[in-house]
Structure formats: structure tokens, C-alpha cells
Amino acid sequence: MVKQKVTLLFELASCITASGASAASKFQIDSLTGQVRVGEPLDYDAATGGVSYYDLTVTATDKGATPRTGTKNYRVNLQDENDNVPVFVDFTWIADVPENKNIGDVITTLTLEDDDGDAVTASLVDGDVSVFSISGSDVTLAQALDYETSAGHVVVIRYANRREIRLK
Ligand SMILES: [Ca+2]
Ligand SMILES: [Ca+2]
Ligand SMILES: [Ca+2]
């Protein structure tokens, strides 16, 4: 029996997200080669409306006198990338603090969010770093204050992904 070269016609019959929604334009298929390509930007992060995987159904139809169609399902799993920078939420950029605050008192609390779900750490990197310290998400007083000596202190806080803000 001589094996004949069969020409197939590929089609992307459906594309369903992990949450069950149709996402027809996320992937495209080359009808002649069956090669699947990304059709639109992908996003893994639930916080920004992303999904963890797509289920694709591909059909291949031959060109026989009575064409026959085969179906195969594929799961495309997305991998999380660190593509979101952490952000400060409801942050007091300038804190007015009475000079009689005690060492260890909380000056302000940092609320940090990251759409990748990464743990975010903050640290003091510049300015009056000896005056404050960071304990978890709290900025605390590390040194006694004296208004007559210095009416203000500036410190630079660095958090994951290396964005910097100034706390006065
Ligand atoms: Ca993303
Ligand atoms: Ca991500
Ligand atoms: Ca991140």
C-alpha cells in the first residue's frame, strides 16, 4: 500500500480560559501548518484580570472525497512573571510627628501591594536613616527627636522592584 501525502486543514475550534470564558482571539492557528501563535498579549495575574491557563480545541480536516475531521485538546499553561511593580496604597507622604514621640513609636505604616502577589519588602536606603527604622510595614522612630535641633527629617525608602519615594 502506498502512503499518500495528506493535506490537512487546521482550525482553532475553541479557546476557553481557566475561568470558563471564551477567548477566541488570544491564539491563532495557521490553517496549513497547524502552528499555533499568540494573537493577543497574555496575562497570568488574577489581580489584573489574567488567567493561569487556556484550553484550546484544534480540529484537523482532511481533503478526502468525504472529508473527515479529527479533534485534539491542548492546555496552554501560563507562567507568572514579575511584570508588576509594587505600589504604595493610602500612603502619607508627609508625616507630622510631635517631637516627644518615643523611640520605637510608629510614625507611619506602609501598605504595599503587588499585582503579582509578590512579598514586598521596604528598607531605608538614604537620608536620615539613623532616625527611623522599618519593622515589617511600620516605620518607627529609632532616635529621639528635637524640634529645635532639626525641624524635619527626610528618608528614602526602597521597596522591591526598586522604586523610591521620599518620606519627610
Ligand atoms: Ca501580568
Ligand atoms: Ca505577573
Ligand atoms: Ca511584582
Image (cartoon, rainbow, N blue to C red):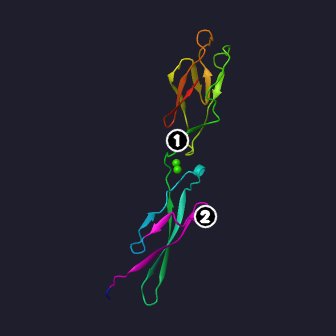
Q: Mark 1 or 2 closer to N-term?
A: 2
Q: Quadrant of the N terminus?
A: bottom left
Residue 23 vertical placement versus 127 (above, below): below
Label 1 sits on a secondary structure element that is loop
Q: Is residue 120 magenta?
A: no
Q: Residue at x 50, y 46 (%)?
A: 83
Up/down of 119 relative to 101, above or below = below
* Residue 109 pos. (x, y %): 64, 29
Mark nearer the viewer, 1 or 2:
1
Q: Give the residue displayed 59% in from the left and 52% down from the top.
A: 46
Give me the C-alpha separation between circle 1 and circle 2.
28 Å
Q: The residue under label 2 is which amino acid type?
A: Ala
Q: Is residue 74 left or right of residue 100?
A: left
**Toward the viewer: 101 or 137?**
101
Determine if the C-beta at disc 1 is less than 8 A from ligand 3. yes
| Stretch in magenta | 3-29
The amino acid pointed to by label 1 is Val
Q: Is residue 40 above or below residue 69?
A: above
- Residue at the image point whose x is 57% and y is 17% from the top: 131
The answer to which image quadrant residue 18 occupies is bottom right
Q: Residue 32, labelled with which disc?
A: none
**Residue 122's spot in the image, x, y percent?**
55, 31
- Percent across and percent down for residue 19 are 61, 60
Disc 2 element: loop
Q: Are marks 1 and 2 in contact (CB under 8 Å)?
A: no
The disc placed on residue 21 is 2
Q: Residue furthest left?
A: 2
Looking at the image, the residue that sits furthest to the top is 148
The C terminus: image quadrant: top right
Across and down, in percent, residue 20 comes to 61, 64
Task: Kindly identify which residue carries mark 1.
Answer: 85
Of residues 166 and 38, the one nearer the viewer is 166
